[in-house]
Image (tube, coloured by chain):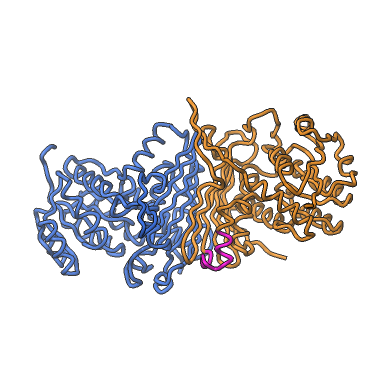
Amino acid sequence: MMERINLGVISYAHPHAPKYAAAIIACPRADLAGIAGLGVNADLAAEEAERYGILYYADYQELLARDDLAGVYVGTEPTCHLEVIAEATAHGKHVLCDKPIALTLGEADDIIRAAEEAGVKLMVPFNPRFQLPLMKVKAALESGEAGELVSIFAIKYGKLPTKIPGPADYGWLVDPEQAGGGGFLDIGIHAVDALRWLAGSEARRVYAHVGTALYEGLPVDDIGTMTVEFENGMVGALSAGWANPDGYPTWLDVRFEILTTQGAFLIDSPYHDYWCYGTIRAERQYWWRRDVDGLVDEFVRAILEDREPAITGEDARAALAISLAAYESSASGQVVVLEHR
Amino acid sequence: MAGEQIKVGLIGCGNIGAGGHLPAYAHIPEAELVAVCDAVEELAHAAAERSGATAYTDYRRLLEREDVEMVDLCVPTYLHAQLAVEAMQAGKHVLCEKPMAHTLEAANAMIEAAQANGVKLMIGQVRRFDHRYASIKAQIDAGKVGRPVFIRRAERQFLPFLPDAWQWDPRRGGGVILDIGVHATDLFRWLLGQDAVEVYAVAKSVREAAREAESFDHAFITCKFDGGGIGFAEASWAYPQGFGGTLYAQLDVVGTEGKIQYSDKDTNPMLIYTTEKGHELPRYFRFMSTTEYAFEEEIRHFARCVLDDWEPAVGPQDARAALEMVLAAQRSAETGEPVHLPLQKESR
């Protein structure tokens, strides 16, 4: 019989939480054992637990106290990550922590250390790593058939998170105190990780403009552009933010345009889709979010096989460092040179 | 006025001269191509044969012709200023290929010559005459996307010339930043309606030809504008052959109330499947970067400017500004630092 593990979900603050709950349920090697509400959208978390017929915990500590629980998905605001992860790791639970890992590198270090000391897995889900087109590119780069990577011209756009349909409150994402940044950090960090992952190298120089250009009065940035040079010479050029207007036919707009010494890859969407036309709106529907399933599966396998997950705390810290460098460059008007430990 | 026509001398019968401009004259009732010139005799004669114009190998002889009122300059960039100034001193109106020149001093000399001789000068920033971009500009002007705040542009191809071609040479052509980047910088200014205050670029020499010529063939250029707008461009000659043919261009305009997305891929209405080649996108235009119609519109517009005494849609100051931005980008790529505008003279 296939070995299975129990996972829990802590907090529905993050818009991804419902997707991870569903992916855990769909995962053949895992069961969703319980959902804990913490902070905003706790009522939504309770409703989902009821719908799924699983236990709901108003106090996440009670979920963590369960002996049959192997790990948790942490979907709190990033400012709560350290506290929750410190508790989870103290209970010996493996942690899948949504991005960004933290708002400062110091907190990221504390989170990484907590997991290390407890001997548990820490993974941060960056979706592009489990999107089929980018996985193909990575494989072609690793096999050498694509030659050397020259540059990636990428975009990662979404809509304003406060416009996510439904009753949930995602207002914290536009609060600089709780989110640490706006659209460029929120959605861009996925692409930042993808640039670093595909480059297979560390970022060296970062130049960026990040600002509030689309939504007047928004207390955080809504769009940013960054040029990042990696130690191996790869150049990443990224624009990211909440640049999709309401009428855009998908929530996301993702492009990776990749030049190598042997050719080029033009990736226009992260997912396979089809068109759905209504009387007023036309929508492109994704027929499978394979990446979320893939991320959960990777987390579960890393636990079962007792190995490092594909995306580590250090990866998450590096992506945060690049994103923070972009904000620093934008504020100073200078190129920021990153040092590596 | 209807029925009027001006006589034109085309100088430079290379890729753009013979391939882009020359065939356009057959469709422009306002202009008659009467003289063609190239320092390479075979090119001049081939152009003459195709057009019925008289061939010259010395542009001075062409400029001596009193019936020629307009000169169309399709020579390498480093020769623009010298030839344009001489043509204007000879009383000719000048349509000159982009980029305007290889230095700001040269561009200034062209502007001064136009003023001093009372003739018209237009630089062939041909994107402005391309139906794709004219349509997008009209949508922006109609308020369809609100106020444009961010423009992302890609112009990518495989430059098919040998390493000794002037395009690769940093002194004669300026490499990809000047030659292709100037399309992006002009597009940014035009669509945003703002002036640039800062330019940053990271560039590489990817292909062997670029490394041999010690020139950049691949660049990312960021332009910050006085109204807060940002332009972000990839300009490249390093894409594989074939790729650039049908997938040359991309343009995204992000506005406060909407977004425009253009890509050659999405606009290409046809796929061809064959056993031999698999599937391919057909090439509808000789240069996918620029349609035949864009060259026609551009030349026709300038002929009308001469005939009807209009101000050219792309003024010399516009072309100079687009040039200044790419010169700043070139300097930024060399120094690794952002460059502020207006461009200061280099101290060295």
Instruction: Specify the colour of chain B.
Output: blue
Which part of the image, by quadrant, shows the C terminus of chain A?
bottom right
Residue A329 visible in the snapshot: yes
Residue ID at (56%, 47%):
A270
- How many marks are shown on the rendered structure? 0
Q: Identify whether B156 is placed above or below A270.
A: below
Q: Is residue A140 magenta?
A: yes
- For this view, does A139 lie left or right of residue A123? left
Residue A325 found in image quarter:
bottom right
> Percent position (x, y) of residue A32?
78, 41
Which residue reaches farthest top?
A279
- Which residues fall within the magenta stretch? A137-149
> Percent position (x, y) of residue A256?
53, 52
- For this view, does A106 lie left or right of residue B334? right
> Percent position (x, y) of residue B189?
41, 46
Residue ID at (85%, 58%):
A119
Q: Which chain is rendered orange in the image? A: A
Q: Nearer the viewer, residue B131 or A226?
A: B131
- For this view, does A169 lie left or right of residue B65? right
Q: Nearer the viewer, residue A127 or A172?
A: A127
Q: Is residue B232 magenta?
A: no
Residue ID at (79%, 33%):
A53
Which residue reaches farthest bottom?
B212
- For this view, does B257 lie left or right of residue B171? right
Residue A177 visible in the snapshot: no
Q: Nearer the viewer, residue A262 or A159?
A: A262
Residue ID at (75%, 52%):
A300
Q: Identify whether B7 is placed above or below B335.
A: above
> Percent position (x, y) of residue B163?
35, 72
